[in-house]
Image (tube, grey):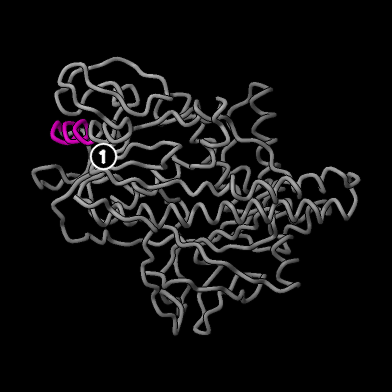
Amino acid sequence: MQLRYNYRAYPDAPQRRALAQAFGCARVVWNDCLRDRKEAHAAGLPYVTSAVLSRLRITQAKRTEERAWLADVSAVVLQQALRGLDIAYKNFFDSVRGKRQGRKVGPPRYKSKKDTRQSIRLNTNAFCLKDDGTVYLAKVGNLKVRWSRRLPAVPTSLTVTKDSCGRYFLSFVVDTEPDNLPEVDHDTGIDLGLSAFAVLSDGTKIHSPRFLRRAEKKLKRLQRELSRKAKGSKNRAKARFKVARQHAKVADRRRDWHHKASTQIIRENQAVFVEDLAVSGLGRTRLAKSVHDAGWSAFVGMLEYKAALYGRTFAKVDRAFPSSQVCSTCGYRDGPKPLHVREWTCSGCGTVHDRDHNAARNVLFEGRRIVAAGRVETANACGASVRRAHVPAQRVEAGSLRKGQTTQAGSPGLKPREHVKPSWKRPSR
């Protein structure tokens, strides 16, 4: 199983210039190779292979006057940029042929130096962890890193990223084994919503923090200041930086809260079942801002990979399942109901239902049925071990260690952090 571990890095001024040059060189190689393939396709020529592009756009380009500055960065950065283009094309071809699940993937696009996110990828030939807690990058130097937790194993690859507000992050890919938690006699169904972020099948309500709504007043003021600045001026760049930093704070708070909530749900339940919502469709309605503020897709993704990591069962219930129309007590289908109806009485048995709680119970029952039918690649209800879904990570980034390299997992002197629980309580029974 492969996992990613992200850490904040603090390069000094020369290192920032070296990283900026590496970002630019990787972007140029990507665009040059993409242009060659597009021109070949437009001319009806065969697909240009990676070997030809590597020789033409990296090896020979370094010897030309126009691209001589490509030799100033590590060759691994350039090769990984070409490999990333190959992955993008493979995802596009698999999506067209129907081999790739999920939404359709478009063809690769050109990169710009004005993109909000710049990144480079390195394998173990171009980086290593030092005993003093720094990370050495080829032709960049030793970067200071804020180690928030230890790495569980030796990393196989590294991605260096610069976000829109100028922060640098190191993302390590690590091969690790599943860490199965002790079994518990409890499973849950989850109904995601807006008035309450999530309602569990036992009646627990997780209230939505609404991070974007809480920061909206300050964001409006910063956006007004940005709109008044002249385009192309330094003051406009400073104002844009302030807006990006505020948005990054909102995203960081939401992500931290999602991690804490999803971890607690996985720890307390042996099986977790969630309704598969059409988030992209809901994001085009009048509720778009609230839907994106909730971040349902990121939360469900965390539940899925943490279930695989900790040996829990996870399943998605089809979005067409009428969870809000069926009585969870007698099974009578009472028909669709508008969103303003939060409580309703079953016409079959007379039970008064809370809309969200009833939906969560129905999701639980349907999830159990799916698991019993053997449609989930996790440990089933009878305890039999079935193949688990892999945690998504870039498997093509693996490299080989250099001779005499002393890379170790973790950082010296770092103590593990204690788990912080989200602020909600289960109702008394």
* Looking at the image, residue 286 lies above or below residue 179: above
Q: Is residue 365 magenta?
A: yes
* Looking at the image, residue 277 lies above or below residue 138: above
Q: Residue at x 58, y 62 (%)?
A: 169
Q: Amino acid at mark 1?
A: Gly
Q: Residue at x 38, y 65 (%)?
A: 420
Magenta span of residues: 364-373
Quarter occupied by residue 372: top left
Residue at the outermost left position: 382
Q: Is residue 294 magenta?
A: no
* Lateral position of residue 37 relative to residue 114, left or right: left
Q: In which quadrant is the N terminus drawn?
A: bottom left
Q: Residue at x 63, y 43 (%)?
A: 53
Quarter occupied by residue 326: top left
Q: Secondary structure at mark 1?
A: strand
Q: Dot 1, crowdedness within 10 Å: few (<14), some or many (≥20)?
A: many
Viewer-nearest residue: 224 or 412: 224
Quarter occupied by residue 414: bottom left
Viewer-nearest residue: 207 or 133: 207
Residue 44 percent across, percent down from the top left: 64, 21
The residue at which mark 1 appears reads as 189
Residue 189 percent across, percent down from the top left: 26, 39
